[in-house]
Image (cartoon, rainbow, N blue to C red):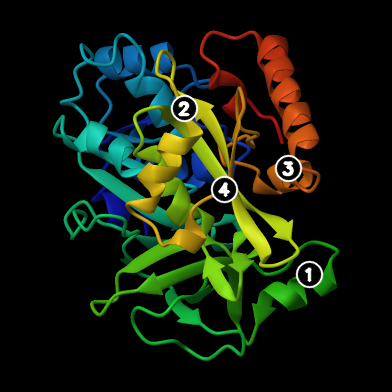
Amino acid sequence: MSQHMHDMTAEDHVLTVLPMFHVGGLNIQTTPALQLGATVTLHARFAPDGALEAIARDRPTLTVLVPATIQAMIEHPHWAETPLDSLRAMTTGSTQVPQRLVDAFTQRGVPVLQVYGSTETCPIAVYTRLSGDWRRPGSTGLPGLVCETRVVDDAGNELPAGQPGEVVVRGPNVFFEYWGNAAATAEALRDGWYHSGDIGTRDADGHFFIHDRKKNTIISGGENIYPAEVERVLHQHPAIAEAAVIGRPDARWQEVPVAYIVRRAGIAADPAEIERFCLAQLARYKVPREYMFVAALPRNAMGKVQHFRLKEQTTGGADEAGALRQETEQKADEDRCPGRWQWLVRGRR
């Protein structure tokens, strides 16, 4: 499926900067390229200057980046002067990808392919193709060559186009079991389908759109709020470098959305102005009720925001937000590496 996705041949040169302990760094391009006899350049860890230097010097044709690494690269002083013309495509995924990050590459002539999947799907399950329709904003593409993908309700019934539900996958790329955990296996694998825990939709042409993790969904006054939708709006604000939205318990509405924000350097971020910005693009019940400003967001090794950690900090309000702010500032001090993204992808589990 990777070779199909990328129109990959033995003439390709893959630059791998993501950690090899993760299925994304290992299997999206690296092992498929080796199987074809293509060239693979491996970096011990990601650093934006090192990645840009390798693109200029080694002239790779393909690479995989996640949003955190994309942002680090496009904010680097050498981004504008680094030639990208050797790249046939840049592949991304792992989490919601803000459109501005996609645009940073496409505006410089590099097609951006999106892939959806998980460790349990090896990981490729849905993708856009280099020779296919990759210009559909926000879409992660069509089901892969060897698997089936559906959107289903809680009873497992397939839903019509445009209606959100859980994404399920079936095929030989799907895992066999969680080792030594029969209960978890039975929960995830039902009637041959892997239940991903992700909420998505498909359009009338069968293209998939992933909205959020099912467990991240905020239920406010009986309405579903997908944090990724709110985050996409927040990411468009000029003062916001990063944002994550979670649900805070509320006596009246059950839950209300709260935003954690990392300010963009040198630009003032006023909560009232951010709220007006959100109101212009979102229904009122989706607009965050509070804005917490922090030094950094908690992330895993692949750069995914750990919403569960934010949720743990939010249950008590301002005191916990202050604790998170202190914790993230301490983390930045402890890591002390050139470029704060480096610690995100160096093997931390």
For discs 3 and 4, the disc positioned in front in the rendered view? 4
> Where residue 80 sits in the image (x, y, percent)?
22, 15
User: Do tag 4 and tag 1 residues touch (Cβ < 8 Å)?
Assistant: no
For discs 3 and 1, the disc positioned in front in the rendered view? 3
Q: Which of marks 1 and 2 is nearer the N terminus?
A: 2
Query: What is the CA distance from the residue labelled 3 to the residue labelled 1?
Result: 22 Å
Position above or below: 205 against 9:
below
Q: Earlier in the sequence, mark 2 or mark 4?
A: 2
Q: According to the image, label 1 marks what residue?
A: 184
Query: What is the CA distance from the residue labelled 4 to the residue labelled 1?
Result: 27 Å
Secondary structure beneath disc 1? helix
As drawn, is 332 to the left or to the right of 156?
Answer: right
Q: According to the image, label 3 marks what residue?
A: 309
Mark 1 surroundings within 10 Å by alpha-carbon count, few (fewer than 14), some (14 through 19), many (20 or more): few
Q: Which of marks 4 and 1 is nearer the N terminus?
A: 1
Q: Is residue 100 visible?
A: yes
For discs 4 and 1, the disc positioned in front in the rendered view? 4
In the image, which disc is placed on residue 245?
4
Position above or below: 262 against 198:
above
Q: Label 3 is placed on what type of residue? A: Arg
Q: According to the image, label 2 marks what residue?
A: 17
Secondary structure beneath disc 4? strand
Query: What is the CA distance from the residue labelled 3 to the residue labelled 4?
Result: 12 Å
As drawn, is 240 to the left or to the right of 251?
Answer: left
Residue name at image x 31 percent, y 62 percent? 141
Query: What is the CA distance from the residue labelled 1 to the residue labelled 2?
Result: 32 Å
As drawn, is 348 to the left or to the right of 12?
Answer: right
